[in-house]
Amino acid sequence: MDKYLQVENAGMVFEKRGQSCEVLRDISLTVKRSEFVSLIGHSGCGKSTLLNLVAGLLKPTTGHLLLGNKEIAGPGPERGVVFQNHSLLPWLTCTGNVMLAVERVFGEREKRARLLERTRAALALVGLTEAANKYPDEISGGMKQRVGIARALAMEPKVLLLDEPFGALDALTRAHLQDELLAIVANTGSTVVMVTHDVDEAVLLSDRIVMMTNGPAATIGGILEVDLDRPRNRLSLATNPRYIECRREVLEFLYQRQARKAA
Amino acid sequence: MALGIAVFIVLWAFIAKFGRIPDPVSVGKEAIKVFSNPFYSNGPNDQGIGWNVLMSLGRVGIGFGLAAAVGIPLGFLIGRFRFLSDMAAPIIALLKPVSPLAWLPIGLLVFKAANPASIYVIFICSLWPMIVNTAVGVRQIPQDYLNVARVLNLSEWKVFTKILFPAVLPYMLTGVRLSIGVAWLVIVAAEMLTGGVGIGFWVWDEWNNLKVDHIIIAIIVIGLVGLVLEQALIFVARKVSHG
């Protein structure tokens, strides 16, 4: 089996004012090239922490992570991250924000004209050619998130890491961006790891869904293969028995086996 | 606005009727005389109001510029490194509330001349707001922006020019505005004590000559200059601030 991204017995303990808090325990997961994997679980289960480990923003307390058989030692441009809150720099235009990433990855090898071309192409890919010279506070939330995706894609990352990328958007915009993401991933063949708490989103987009148990010391509770054909269409899936079955399984996991105790 | 100024002038005229303060009309006449030749020079102790204001502004400019050159980098360091911040905090807390004029004798002692001593006082009083506001700005930078820097693996230089500096700029400009405001307050007092050419000394000199109408003109001029400085900096701050 093609083991592209490997997480081996990773555990994460945070030290806070002398108290230690175990967030993740004994996580093992392999992701194949061009696979789309979702991490789903209740909030506070450490799914974002796991994504940050893959991104290299955090270092695991125990175990290790490998990408293409090389240990992940820190953040790197071969892993493009899309943050939940878009994290665009407000003093740069959309072009400027994407350009910052493009310059970092390709700046030493390519001429400026080529870098601008890459930036334009990335913005065109997410349908933002018109807004290229606008500042983040001049565009809508959905558009900001698209710039975030364009910034990550423009780096031509080996792995795309999405941290609840559509969590802050309204349902219609979210559905629209999910469809766009499906098309982009189908075109680029990217390997994707996405954190989400949206069951429909996970089933619609993923090849596999990693279901996480509740924290503290969260671990992988189960992995569901979503063996639905691609390209997927949200309308025809709505009545597809396998889709409904997948959906039921994730819901059952979240609301029966890992039901949150009344807060 | 016009009404406010009119009421003010009427009140002034009313008070002038009973006191020793010159009334608006005589001050106005005198002001025309003073402003008709603002740049005359009859030796070091008798120069036009234009020269006096420019000399004061020059001192503020130099003292303030030095304070910016020292305070902004210091503020960045203190904001970025906890260790330095812990070290500097008690010293800043102790020295910040000290009236800048208390530093004047030290300045005279060290520099043995009036002009560098008043520049030094301006430097000291401008320094604290610059350091404190820059440091606060650095500490306020959202973690998100720094995460962007990390996942993009930006060079230190890029992090500074594309993230730290623009994020801190609005805070820095607040520091600049506070500093200039304080500096302009302090220069008048410092010049009263040190003499030479300058708007503060001019006020003191006219008091010694008992030309009260000139003192009132000076007060209005000082106010106007302060207002212009403040508005200019607010304008700049608005130009460069984002979200």
Image (spheres, coloured by chain):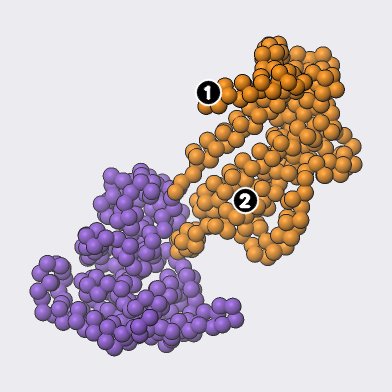
Query: Residue B76 in the image: x percent, y percent?
Result: 63, 54
Chain A colour in the picture? purple
Report which residue position mark 2 lands on: B133
Q: Secondary structure at mark 2?
A: helix
At 80% from the left and 35% from the top, the residue drawn is: B190
Residue A107 left/right relative to B12:
left
Going by the numbered disc 2, the residue's amino acid type is Asn
For the residue pair B79 and A123, the one nearer the viewer reads as B79
The colour chain B appears in is: orange
The one nearer the camera, B95 or B68, is: B95
Instruction: Using residue B230 as the reference point, say whether residue B219 is left or right of it.
Output: right
Q: Residue at x 32, y 76 (%)?
A: A39
Q: How many marks?
A: 2
Q: Which mark is residue B2?
A: 1
Q: CA distance from mark 1 to mark 2?
A: 36 Å
Q: Which mark is residue A222?
A: none
In this picture, residue A12 sits left or right of residue A134: right
Q: Position of residue A89 (x, y in %)?
A: 44, 53
User: Residue A244 location, x and y as percent?
Assistant: 15, 78
